[in-house]
Image (tube, rainbow, N blue to C red):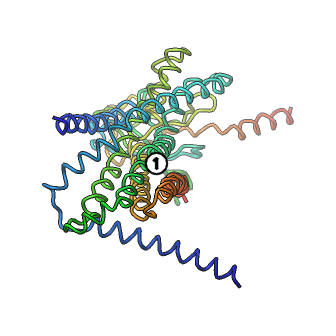
């Protein structure tokens, strides 16, 4: 009987460990396995990406629809080229959609907001979003402001 | 000249201890598996090392989470960003505090007990008697205890992290009135399962290995006297804590520091 209680408590202990791990995965880290594989990639070129990093979210009307996969420098156009993984079920982004780099709050992280255009044709895997708007860089804004003040 | 010789002697004996520890580990773990005999012994040790440590882990996890929530709130509320408390509590617990504090508590609660138990077995010549009747004490005594510690620490660390996060949520959301949704949403946005939770667990696995190894070795290698046992127990707690804190820095640098 002693051995039996011992085994039961060890079983409960191991189970508690598994439950804790699952809780950490689902509740704390918000792990979402369901639509992680089914994505397609679209690209966009930006003049300036500011503080955008890989894994930053891509949103449409504030809803997360994907994440930034990769940021490289386009050698020919001398612009930043951002690759975005968009969830497969979001397949209605028209070819004239625009992408802009936005900031969450005053000091928050930067993310990409996509707004859909009017064309009937949709973006396919590997397509480029042509209409882009760069990140607002605070120093540039202040610089412009000062320059205007001086010229007046 | 005498001092130099003393230094050399001390260095050599430390090296020899490392060698003995490695030999002991190798001899107790690398052998023909005997699941029928070993598994009940292992389960018994999981009970002593893991289940009985559960209370101290849960209580300290809860209080550490609550303190983190309180401290984070009082600072972040000045900047109007008290929603970030969830993110702060979860990241600091999952990445750092859960593995490290669990390992430190584990060294104090279970490591010292392992050392004292094995040391007393050695002092009362139970280990020699086992050897005399043809049972390898390394396999029968040391191996199940080692595996139990190795398995238990990651489990305890996961429980610690989860209880701590809920402790932080109790203080932050229930008492201080942070908005429920943004508390959890900020946390889930910033905590990544692979980068944060799994790396924290890897830390716990490494600490489990080191702490249990130190504990069983100090017990097995102690002077077979009452004084020797007390010294070995002290050494277990001191060495294990130092090893955990030192290794934590190295692991953090490799995992999160982009070195």
Q: Position of residue B197 (x, y in %)?
A: 41, 42
In the shown orientation, is residue B99 left or right of residue A144?
left
Q: Position of residue B198 (x, y in %)?
A: 38, 46
Query: Observer-nearest residue: B168 or B133?
Result: B133
Residue A66 lies in quadrant: top left
Query: Observer-nearest residue: B16 or B189?
Result: B16
- Quadrant the N terminus of chain B occupies: bottom right
Q: Position of residue B17 (x, y in %)?
A: 47, 71
Chain hosting mark 1 = B
Q: Position of residue B235 (x, y in %)?
A: 52, 57
In the shown orientation, is residue B169 left or right of residue A17?
right
Query: Observer-nearest residue: B221 or B240?
Result: B221
Q: What residue is at 15 percent from the left and 56 percent from the top?
A: B35
Q: Which residue is label 1 attached to? A: B107
Whether residue B257 is visible, yes or no, is no
- Quadrant the C terminus of chain B occupies: bottom right
Whether residue A145 is visible, yes or no, is yes
Q: What residue is at 64 percent from the left and 23 percent from the top?
A: B74
As drawn, B257 above or below B164: below
């Amino acid at each position: 009987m002693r051995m039996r209680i011992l085994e039961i408590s060890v079983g409960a202990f191991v189970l508690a460990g598994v439950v804790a791990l699952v809780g950490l995965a689902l509740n704390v880290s918000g792990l979402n396995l369901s639509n992680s594989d089914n994505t397609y990639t679209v690209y966009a070129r930006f003049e300036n990406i500011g503080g955008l990093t890989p894994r930053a979210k891509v949103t449409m009307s504030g809803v997360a629809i994907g994440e930034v996969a990769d940021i490289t420098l386009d050698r020919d156009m001398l612009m930043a080229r951002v690759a975005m993984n968009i969830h497969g079920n979001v397949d209605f982004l028209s070819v004239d959609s625009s992408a802009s780099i936005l900031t969450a709050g005053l000091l928050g992280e930067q993310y990409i907001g996509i707004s859909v255009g009017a064309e009937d044709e949709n973006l396919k895997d590997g397509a480029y979003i042509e209409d882009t708007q760069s990140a607002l860089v605070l120093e540039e804004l202040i610089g412009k402001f000062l320059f205007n003040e001086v010229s007046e | 000249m005498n001092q130099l010789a003393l230094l050399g002697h001390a260095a050599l004996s430390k090296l020899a201890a490392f060698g003995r520890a490695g030999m002991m580990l190798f001899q107790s773990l690398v052998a023909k598996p005997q699941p029928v005999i070993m598994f009940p012994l292992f389960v018994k040790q999981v009970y002593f090392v893991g289940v009985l440590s559960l209370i101290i882990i849960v209580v300290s996890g809860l209080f550490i989470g609550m303190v983190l929530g309180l401290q984070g709130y009082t600072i972040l509320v000045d900047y109007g960003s008290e929603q970030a408390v969830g993110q702060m509590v979860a990241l600091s617990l999952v990445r750092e505090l859960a593995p490290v504090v669990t390992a430190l508590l584990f060294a104090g609660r279970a490591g010292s007990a392992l050392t004292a138990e094995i040391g007393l077995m050695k002092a009362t010549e139970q280990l020699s008697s086992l050897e005399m009747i043809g049972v390898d004490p390394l396999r029968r005594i040391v191996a199940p205890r080692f595996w139990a510690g190795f398995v238990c620490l990651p489990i305890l660390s996961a429980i610690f992290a989860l209880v701590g996060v809920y402790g932080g949520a109790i203080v932050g959301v229930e008492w201080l009135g942070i908005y429920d949704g943004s508390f959890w949403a900020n946390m889930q946005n910033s905590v990544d399962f692979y980068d944060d939770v799994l790396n924290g667990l890897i830390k716990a696995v490494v600490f489990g290995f080191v702490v249990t190894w130190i504990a069983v070795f100090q017990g097995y290698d102690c002077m077979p006297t009452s004084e020797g046992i007390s010294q070995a127990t002290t050494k277990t707690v001191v060495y294990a804590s130092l090893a955990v804190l030192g290794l934590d820095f190295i692991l953090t640098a490799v995992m999160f520091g982009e070195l």
